Image (tube, helix red, strand yellow):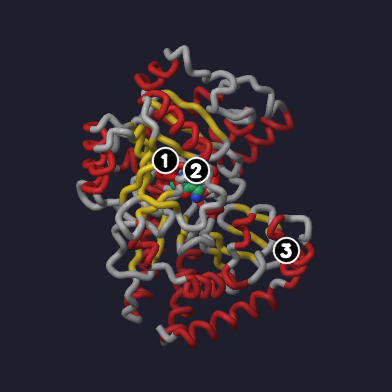
């Protein structure tokens, strides 16, 4: 890779973004009352455009910005909009619940909740569900329950996994092979090794070494890593994780928030996995904040039988708005009408097409890159063969290169997720959308390495 050429192209695309998006640039310059000028600090992950494009409208697989440009959206809110933006069935259900029936925060259950619980059981397996508004909270509450029920203090995660802003999960394998704070961790409450253990994904020996201490309440993991590129499990790995967690009396929590892309019941159903707890968030609300965790009936009984645990009031599990009528209505509409079993077939086929397009581009220039797919989600990484652990994948990151590709695509009407090179299909994505990406991606590579 000619780095000088890359830097020149990045500077050119950066200038082009400023030329194309003067209103967004101006809005950002005026946002003096926002921390970091944005409503949420991660919105500053703008590639080297130096300002975010401001949202005007979004529908299905399309987003428009306030400068009047339309984008094919493969970012889809980093999975929050995997159902497409404001899908009709969800819009109607939300409108009906909020405007006609009212009561988004009445602190009373609605009958939709049992429907959603039953549907999540049909899809994922666990039989007792509780709701949150974010995947982070579903994870946070699950690990509290896991500590309570096992009486053990620690949680184990995979190095360079991401499970939301969960204190216990911000740990990586350090150069000496042992756990250390994830670089950049903001204001940790204590040394993370007091609360957590860590193992590389696809490394059963390391997992066993850590579990053998006998102090791990739960392994919290994604069946495939999705937040450091996609790192797929090697044959036998997930079976090994289940066998080891059972052997050492540790619960297994599958976080399906992103791996839901693998099918209607995520990787858990697609690969016949048997977690003790399953967590999910983002997409299941079709764009309305919603999350959930599911427990086995046996685990639920053990927790409910404990007089010393305050599950009703201030015990640390739950939130005032969690399970509210609006959020639950949105989950029902999303699962019943939008992210249906049939929808996943179509999304997966489109993702295969996307993957083939990326692979063709990589092959044309014999680039040492790899592309991985998990159902409706495709991602390329600057390493070949594809990394097999989070640490390997982290080492393959190249911010300048990533920024160039993101900006090049955005300036031509295509959005990838701002973090790494992820493209997701929704029910409204079309073959033409995918082919447009293939063409623009090929053009970007031709300029870069041609
Ligand atoms: N789990 C996984 C696997 C995720 O990727 C994320 C966010 N990217 C979360 C949990 C947290 O989701 P949220 O920020 O919506 O709480």
Check contact, mark 3 vs mark 2: CB within 8 A: no
The quadrant of the picture occupied by the C terminus is: bottom left
Compute the Cα span from label 1 to label 3.
47 Å
x then y, percent, for residue 337? 51, 38
State the residue at coordinates (65%, 64%): 52
Q: Which mark is residue 190?
A: 2
Q: Which mark is residue 66?
A: 3
Of residue 178 and residue 356, the one placed in the foreground of this image is 178
Of residue 418 and residue 35, the one placed in the foreground of this image is 35
N-terminal label among 1 and 3: 3
| Vertical arrangement, residue 217 with respect to residue 239, above or below | above
Tag 1 secondary structure? helix
Mark 1 highlights which residue?
A: 194
x then y, percent, for residue 321? 63, 30
Tag 2 secondary structure? loop
One can see residue 409 in this view: yes
Compute the Cα span from label 1 to label 2.
7 Å
Of residue 254 and residue 156, the one placed in the foreground of this image is 156
N-terminal label among 3 and 2: 3
One can see residue 338 in this view: no
> Dividing the picture into quarters, in which one does residue 276 lie?
top left
Tag 3 secondary structure? loop
x then y, percent, for residue 413? 59, 69
The quadrant of the picture occupied by the N terminus is: bottom left
């Amino acid at each position: 890779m000619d780095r000088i050429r890359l830097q020149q192209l990045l500077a050119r695309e950066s200038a082009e973004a400023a030329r194309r998006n003067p209103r967004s640039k101006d809005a950002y310059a005026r946002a003096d009352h926002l921390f970091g000028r944005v409503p949420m600090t991660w919105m500053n992950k703008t590639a080297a455009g130096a300002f975010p494009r401001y949202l005007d409208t979004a529908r299905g697989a399309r987003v428009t910005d306030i400068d009047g440009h339309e984008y094919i959206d493969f970012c889809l809110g980093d999975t929050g909009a995997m159902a497409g933006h404001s899908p009709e069935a969800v819009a109607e259900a939300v409108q009906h619940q909020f405007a006609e029936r009212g009561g988004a925060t009445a602190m009373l259950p609605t009958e939709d909740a049992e429907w959603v619980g039953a549907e999540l059981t049909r899809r994922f397996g666990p039989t007792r569900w509780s709701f949150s508004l974010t995947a982070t909270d579903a994870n946070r509450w699950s690990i509290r329950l896991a500590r309570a029920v096992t009486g053990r203090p620690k949680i184990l995660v995979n190095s360079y996994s991401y499970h939301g802003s969960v204190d216990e999960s911000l740990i990586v394998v350090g150069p000496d092979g042992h756990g250390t704070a994830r670089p950049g961790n903001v204001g940790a409450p204590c040394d993370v090794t007091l609360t957590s253990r860590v193992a590389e994904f696809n490394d059963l020996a390391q997992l066993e070494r850590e579990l053998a201490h006998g102090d791990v309440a739960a392994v919290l993991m994604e069946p495939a890593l999705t937040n450091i590129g996609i790192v797929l499990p090697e044959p036998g790995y997930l079976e090994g994780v289940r066998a080891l967690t059972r052997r050492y009396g540790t619960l297994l929590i599958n976080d399906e928030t992103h791996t839901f892309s693998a099918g209607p019941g995520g990787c858990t159903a697609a690969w016949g996995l048997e977690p003790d707890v399953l967590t999910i968030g983002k997409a299941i609300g079709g764009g309305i904040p919603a999350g959930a965790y599911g427990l086995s009936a046996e685990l639920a009984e053990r927790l409910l039988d404990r007089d010393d645990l305050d599950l009703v009031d201030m015990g640390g599990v739950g939130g005032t708005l969690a399970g509210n009528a609006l959020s639950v209505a949105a989950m029902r509409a999303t699962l019943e009408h939008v992210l249906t079993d049939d929808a996943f077939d179509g999304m997966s086929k489109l993702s295969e097409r996307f993957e083939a397009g990326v692979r063709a581009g990589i092959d044309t220039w014999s680039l040492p890159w790899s592309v991985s797919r998990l159902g409706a989600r495709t991602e390329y990484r600057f390493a070949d063969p594809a990394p097999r652990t989070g640490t390997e994948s982290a080492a393959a990151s190249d911010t300048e290169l990533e920024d160039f590709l993101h900006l090049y695509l955005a300036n031509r009407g295509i959005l990838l997720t701002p973090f790494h090179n992820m493209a997701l299909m929704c029910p409204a994505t079309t073959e033409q959308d995918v082919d447009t990406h293939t063409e623009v991606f090929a053009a970007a590579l031709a300029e870069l390495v041609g």
